[in-house]
RNA sequence: ACCCUCGUAGUUCAAUGGAUAGAACAAGUGCCUCCUAAGCAUUAGAUGCAGGUUCGAUUCCUGCCGAGGGUACCA
């Protein structure tokens, strides 16, 4: 039922496209419906949908595009199309379509009827998805940079879930590498410092206060006579820091389903197996005491090291085993959220998997650019090792979950994000997220007010009374919601939703300024209650996907 | 040196190859006897530089300039 309805919603473009193709028969042009556009023009005065078809074929058939547009228009007018109020041909050769208001008005009824399911096309029904994100090694608190990763990953998961995918949120960390060893050494030396024994702090050790705290706790809990290389230094540190990380994520409303670590792939023998499989494909060789991946054989410019001359693998090898494991688990979609520092690494992982005959087309790598923190007008360089960072917790404390989440997804992933701390703080009451929330709270307030005045909202309202331009505009935007969500699924770019919601909220605020909802005109009041109830549903869906709260009062 | 991402208003960011490049913040001017002024209306302000492809380029290609990231032995 739902599916059927939403096909109707998005089908107006398909419907028009098909009819355009029909009108082309005389030209004997072979053009697929994907090869020309039919989309809302920037300029409202051109109508609701515009097509560039005439411009595209004018060269082939040696004719002025405007003339072609006129001819297509005439043909289509004869077809007497449903829901089309008018067709025009303009300047260079665009064909513009004006859709009847009734189309949008009737759509409102569908929104009210389907409530939070409005716009769903269930593309992920019966399918599963795995989203790997954050994946920070537990060497210190999460920083602002991890925040962008965390919020993108969680929101992408929400987008998939909304489309009915069964989503696994997964956190992967490297616990076998150098970073963790350095962490253990750092704690160890702080421990000896605390118990007043000779110590030597590693030159590249982690310098944060939290290391000292962990060392103190170890001394308090396990006594002061631990020896060098006791594994408690690392295991305790990992336990404590992971606890903090989970708390930080929790305070952002993020929960993981699975934590996977690198060590498990050594234990299970997966890495050995992977190496021998790659060897049999002649993709692995020995040189200078190191084991190399022959990336050049599959198109890379340089071979890469799998196992260093010290006998320690680089991250590439376990990462490949890990992705092989994920593929074998049978997900329909696998998403990795990586920072820009991974740009060069994932092609090696994918090419190795591909060489083993595994399918990798369903792996989507989302690369986001780094966050530059700006404080007092200066850029802050952050390093976990030097403890020179602003933690995610600090950010959430100073701002709020809603602001932090919204701030991280309101920009496209591949923009280098400048996060001005002073600005975010000073203007917190003018933050764009409040604009959305205020629209929602305003709607709720009108509904409350209406109830106090004896207006009970009924689904039997008459949508055809909504004819003010601000009403039509709002209705049109609401009709776009399903298409917008489809785009969000295709691109896995949360920003799409944020921008849409800004538009919708703006449209609502303008409507609020122009039209009074609760008036003496009972029928009109009912219609407008229908309108704002529809807007409420859509804002609510959008905010919940973004993980931002929808307050009934502000 | 090479590779990737990016360069749009004073600032932070939008814009499936389309028509007059959009917002927000900051600056100026209006609007609460009326459902919340966290709002609305309105003024001013931008595609780094040079070429190319195209009917048409912020978008695609080449070069230059600038920012960030990467280039086995951090992940």
Image (spheres, rainbow, N blue to C red):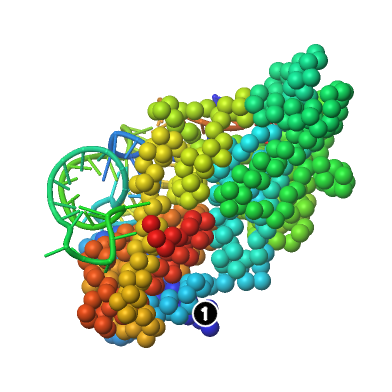
Residue A15 appears at what percent x and percent y?
A: 41, 78
Residue A199 falls in image quadrant: top right
User: Is residue A272 rendered to the left or right of residue A208?
Assistant: right
Chain on which label 1 sits: A
User: Is residue A252 rendered to the left or right of residue A217?
Assistant: left
Up-down relation of residue A465 to residue A508 (above or below): below
Up-down relation of residue A286 to residue B58 (above or below): above
What residue would you read off at disc 1? A2
Residue A79 falls in image quadrant: bottom left
Residue depicted at 52% across the width and 43% down the height: A396
Q: What element carries label 1?
A: helix
Picture quarter with the C terminus of chain A:
bottom left
Residue A94 falls in image quadrant: bottom left
Numbered circles on residues, count: 1
Residue depicted at 38% across the width and 67% down the height: A444
**Counting other residues with Cα less than 10 Å from the Cα at mark 1, is it few (<14), some (14-19), or many (20 or more)?**
some
Q: Nearer the viewer, residue A426 or A418?
A: A426
Instruction: Specify whether residue A283 is in view.
Output: no
Instruction: Specify whether residue A4 is in view.
Output: yes
Residue A380 appears at what percent x and percent y?
A: 49, 28
Up-down relation of residue B64 to residue A343 (above or below): above
């Amino acid at each position: 039922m739902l599916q059927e309805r939403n096909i109707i919603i998005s089908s107006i473009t398909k419907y028009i496209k098909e009819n355009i193709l029909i009108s082309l028969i005389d030209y004997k042009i072979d053009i697929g419906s994907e090869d020309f556009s039919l989309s809302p023009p920037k300029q409202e005065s051109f109508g609701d949908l515009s097509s560039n078809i005439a411009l595209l074929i004018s060269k082939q058939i040696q004719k002025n595009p405007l003339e072609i547009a006129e001819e297509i228009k005439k043909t289509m007018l004869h077809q007497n199309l449903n829901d089309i109020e008018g067709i025009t041909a303009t300047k260079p050769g665009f064909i513009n379509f004006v859709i009847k208001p009734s189309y949008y008005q009737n759509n409102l009824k569908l929104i009210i009827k389907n409530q939070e399911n409005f716009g769903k096309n269930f593309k992920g029904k019966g399918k599963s998805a795995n989203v790997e994100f954050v994946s920070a090694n537990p060497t210190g608190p999460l920083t602002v940079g991890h925040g962008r990763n965390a919020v993108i990953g969680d929101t992408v998961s929400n987008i998939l879930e909304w489309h009915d995918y069964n989503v696994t949120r997964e956190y992967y960390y490297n616990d076998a590498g150098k970073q963790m060893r350095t962490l253990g050494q750092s704690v160890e030396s702080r421990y000896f410092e605390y118990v007043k024994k000779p110590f030597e702090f590693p030159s590249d050790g982690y310098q944060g206060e939290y290391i000292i705290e962990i060392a103190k706790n170890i001394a308090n809990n396990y006594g002061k006579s631990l020896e060098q290389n006791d594994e408690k230094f690392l295991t305790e540190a990992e336990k404590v820091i992971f606890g903090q990380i989970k708390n930080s994520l929790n305070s952002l409303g993020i929960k993981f389903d699975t934590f996977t670590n690198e060590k498990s792939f050594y234990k299970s023998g997966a890495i050995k197996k992977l190496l021998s499989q790659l060897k049999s494909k002649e993709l692995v060789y020995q040189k200078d005491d190191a084991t190399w991946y022959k990336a050049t054989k599959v198109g890379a410019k340089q071979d890469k090291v799998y196992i260093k001359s010290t006998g320690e693998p680089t991250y590439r090898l376990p990462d490949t085993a890990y992705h092989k494991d994920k593929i074998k688990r049978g997900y329909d979609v696998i998403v990795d959220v990586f920072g820009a520092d991974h740009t060069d690494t994932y092609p090696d992982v994918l090419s190795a998997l591909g060489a083993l005959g595994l399918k990798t087309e369903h792996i989507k790598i989302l690369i986001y650019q780094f966050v530059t923190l700006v404080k007092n007008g200066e850029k802050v360089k952050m390093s976990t090792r030097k403890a020179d960072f602003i933690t995610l917790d600090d950010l959430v404390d100073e701002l709020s979950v809603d602001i932090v989440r919204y701030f991280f997804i309101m920009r496209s992933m591949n923009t280098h994000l400048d996060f001005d701390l002073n600005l975010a703080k000073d203007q917190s009451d003018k933050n764009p997220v409040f604009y959305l929330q205020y629209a929602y709270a305003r709607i709720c307030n009108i509904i409350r007010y209406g109830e106090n005045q004896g207006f009970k909202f009924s689904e039997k309202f008459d949508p055809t009374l909504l004819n003010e331009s601000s009403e039509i505009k709002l209705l049109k935007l609401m009709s776009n919601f399903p298409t917008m969500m489809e785009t969000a699924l295709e691109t896995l770019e949360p920003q799409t939703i944020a921008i849409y919601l800004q538009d919708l909220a703006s449209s609502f605020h303008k409507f609020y300024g122009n039209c009074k909802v609760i008036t003496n005109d009972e029928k009109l009041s009912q219609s407008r209650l229908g309108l704002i109830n529809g807007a409420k549903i859509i804002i609510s869906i959008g905010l919940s996907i973004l993980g931002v709260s929808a307050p009934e009062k502000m």
